[in-house]
Amino acid sequence: MPNYYNKDLYKTLNLTFEASKDDIKSAYKKLAKMYHPDVAGSDGDIDKFKEIKEAYDILSNDESRRKYDVLRGFYTQRLAKESAETYKNKYDTYVKRAKKHSEKNESFSNSINEALDSLFHSKHIKQKVNEEVKPPINGSDINLDVSISCFEAITGTNRKINILHTQPCPNCEGRTFINGAKCTMCNGTGEISLQKKINVKIPKDVKQGAKIRIKKEGNKGLHGGKDGDLYLIINIEKNSYYETEGMNLLCNLPITPSEAVFGADITIPYIDGKVNVKIPPMTSSGQKLRLAGMGLYNKSKTKKGDMIITVLIKLPKKLSEKELKLYEELNTISNDDIRTDMNAK
Ligand SMILES: [Zn+2]
């Protein structure tokens, strides 16, 4: 799929999808003059000019414009609009005629019924109803799980994500049949699946399980129906050291037995840098320390959560001979009064 399907080429030319061929031509002439690097007095932006030229090349050719319109959903929008206008004009004409009849003392309601009847059966409308104008179907929403780190939950982040969404089939243009035969490209479903890459912004202070809505990036509507939305479902990854719990950031902090006895100043990773944690002397394993305001804001941004540190006394993976000797010595002199409070009750 060429990447221009992701761009709004009409916008590039300052137009909407309703633009006529002449509109496209004159918009291109005007913008090309403005940006072409060789034109005296122009701003000379070659990238911008290339973009304009690409948009013009695609939109000025009937075949490539039709394909682009179908894939972007403009085709069905235009079709729905045109058929609504045709219907309205015809309806207005019939109502006017019917009123005239009623002034001639004919039954007004009969005339209206006749008018609507003939309108419904008029060959043109019937053909449109059967072949092209199907009732609009809204595109469904897409849910997508997105994993971020605890720190990204605090700061917010960007993600490039791949979504698989459905669009009207470019071959049959969502009509499912071509000349009475089932469309082979979409197998008669009227839709095809497309991979799409989009950049999404994940706001700061997002909580576990939050649903972020990205408008109109869901499955495309059919026959002029609305496009669905994309929902990002946030999973905040936890590891052995950090996790979030609501507004709070929880941290497991390993310290050595001697740090537990004498206390220590320890630096730990936090967002983009480090933060100092003061361990008081005689700290036990499981003791909690609170660093105020280092968690996530609540929804109304009036209150900020904390970082809650749980201290865990850990042994180094390897103890030297000297260390082992010292532990041996400790072992012979240590008392076990830490267990006197234990009882079976
Ligand atoms: Zn098809």
Image (tube, rainbow, N blue to C red):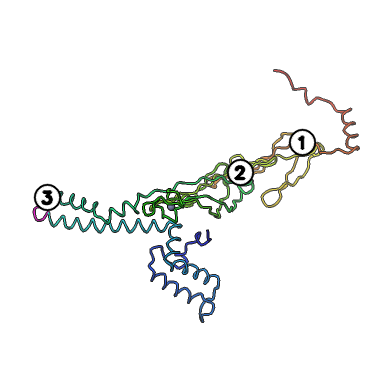
Mark 2 residue type: Ile
Residue extent of the magenta highlight: 102-107
Amino acid type indicated by mark 3? Ser
Could you tell me if residue 208 is visible in this image? yes
Q: Is residue 104 magenta?
A: yes
Q: Is residue 117 left or right of residue 16?
A: left
**Camera-side residue of 310 and 108:** 108
Q: Is residue 225 visible?
A: no
Q: Going 56% across and 55% down the picture, which residue do you hit?
A: 199
| Residue 17, magenta (yes or no) | no
Q: Mark 1 points at which residue?
A: 313
Distance of label 3 from label 1 (alpha carbons): 95 Å
Which disc number belongs to residue 236?
A: 2
Q: Which residue is tagged 3?
A: 107
User: Depth check: 254 or 280 in front?
Assistant: 254
Q: Which of marks 3 and 1 is nearer the N terminus?
A: 3
Q: In this view, does 13 lie above or below 162?
A: below
The picture places residue 259, in percent across and down from the top left corner, at 80, 39
The C terminus - image quarter: top right
Quadrant in the rendering for residue 15: bottom left
Return the residue found at the far top. 345
Left or right of 345: which side holds 222?
left
Q: Which of marks 3 and 2 is in front?
A: 3
- Please name which of the two marks, 1 or 2, marks the residue nearer to the observer: 2
